[in-house]
Amino acid sequence: MSFTQRVMRVMTHVNIGATLGLVAWLAWASLEVASGARPIPRHPPVDRIPAGSRPVSLPCCFVPGTPTGPALLEAHEAQVRRIAAAEVRP
């Protein structure tokens, strides 16, 4: 048997072993959660969040400097005008 065939056979066994280990771990973890031994952490109620970490209003899409309202419409119209003025090349 060549070296390549041996390596491929070993890797197959390693992959099968890793798959079986992963399945066993997932089953164990699922049973731990389902039995209540490990409760799923929940977010704290809003009244328990410290005052300094309360949510604040952020700009649209969390992108700083994004134009909104009329400025956004003007930017869109400028792009449309630029596309309309472009020459069609064969």
Image (tube, rainbow, N blue to C red):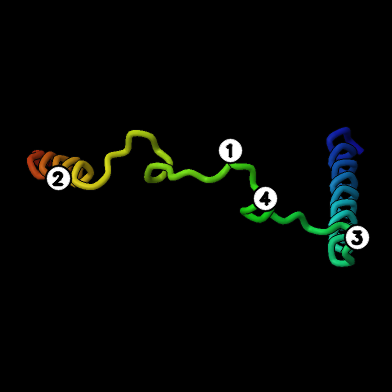
User: Tag 1 or tag 2, which sits nearer the N-term?
Assistant: 1
Query: Which of pointers 3 and 4 indicates the residue nearer the eye?
Result: 4
Residue picked out by circle 2: 77
Q: Position of residue 15 (x, y in %)?
A: 84, 47
Query: Which of pointers 2 and 1 indicates the residue nearer the eye?
Result: 1
Left/right placement of residue 32 relative to residue 85 reads right
Q: How packed is label 4: few (under 14 Cα within 10 Å), some, or many (20 or more)?
A: few
Q: How packed is label 2: few (under 14 Cα within 10 Å), some, or many (20 or more)?
A: few
**Residue sitting at x 92%, y 38%:** 1
Q: How packed is label 1: few (under 14 Cα within 10 Å), some, or many (20 or more)?
A: few
**Residue sitting at x 23%, y 47%:** 69
Depicted 46 relative to depicted 10: above or below: below
3 and 1 marks in contact (CB < 8 Å): no
Residue picked out by circle 3: 37
**Residue sitting at x 87%, y 37%:** 7
Can you tell which quarter of the image residue 76 is in? top left
Report, in whole angstroms, how far the alpha carbon at label 2 lies from the one at label 3. 59 Å
Any mark on residue 52, and which? Answer: 1
Left/right placement of residue 86 relative to residue 7 reads left
Report, in whole angstroms, how far the alpha carbon at label 2 lies from the one at label 1. 41 Å
Name the kind of residue labelled 2 in the image: Glu
User: Tag 1 or tag 3, which sits nearer the N-term?
Assistant: 3
The residue lying toward the viewer, choosing from 7 and 53, is 53
User: Tag 4 or tag 2, which sits nearer the N-term?
Assistant: 4
Residue picked out by circle 4: 48
Q: How packed is label 3: few (under 14 Cα within 10 Å), some, or many (20 or more)?
A: few
Name the kind of residue labelled 4 in the image: Arg
Report, in whole angstroms, how far the alpha carbon at label 3 lies from the one at label 1. 33 Å
Q: Could you tell me which secondary element the residue under label 4 belongs to?
A: helix
